[in-house]
Amino acid sequence: MLWDELLPSSIMREGDIITYATDVGLYIDAEIVRVTCPICLEEFIGSKREAGIFITGHSSYHEFVEERAEYYGGI
Ligand SMILES: [Zn+2]
């Protein structure tokens, strides 16, 4: 299945400025950014807040995997 089939063509793009509401509040003039994980090169496009969560999540994940690999004698 192609990416285009999964998402509508109106999907947010890097550089867009959007205002959106969530359960916890209203995000006004949020800039859409694109970030790449330096370890696995996975990419994310979204608000800076979500991009931060993406980077932090990947960071924790890769650190965890590396620690486990060391513990079990890998790497
Ligand atoms: Zn990653």
Image (spheres, grey):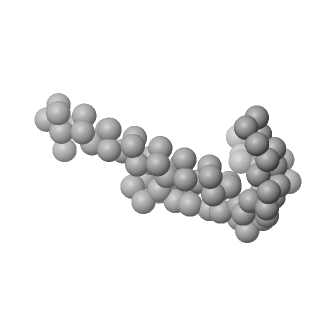
Q: Is residue 59 above or below residue 17?
A: above
Q: Residue extending furthest top?
A: 72
* Picture quadrant of residue 67: top left
Q: Furthest-left residue in view?
A: 73
Q: Is residue 22 visible from the viewing direction of this image?
A: yes
Is 14 on the left-hand or right-hand side of 40? right
Residue under the point 47% across and 56% down: 37
**Depth check: 50 or 7 in front?**
50
Q: Is residue 27 left or right of residue 48?
A: right
**Residue 32 figure quarter:** bottom right
Residue 39 x, y percent position in the rendering: 39, 55
**With respect to residue 2, does 15 lie above or below?**
below
Identify the residue shown where x is 74% and y is 59%.
Answer: 30
Q: Using residue 37 as the reference point, say whether residue 11 is left or right of it.
A: right
Judge by depth and name the residue closer to the eye, 20 or 4: 20
* For residue 23, above or below residue 10: above
Query: Is any atom of residue 13 visible in this view?
Result: no
Front position in the image: 27 or 74: 27
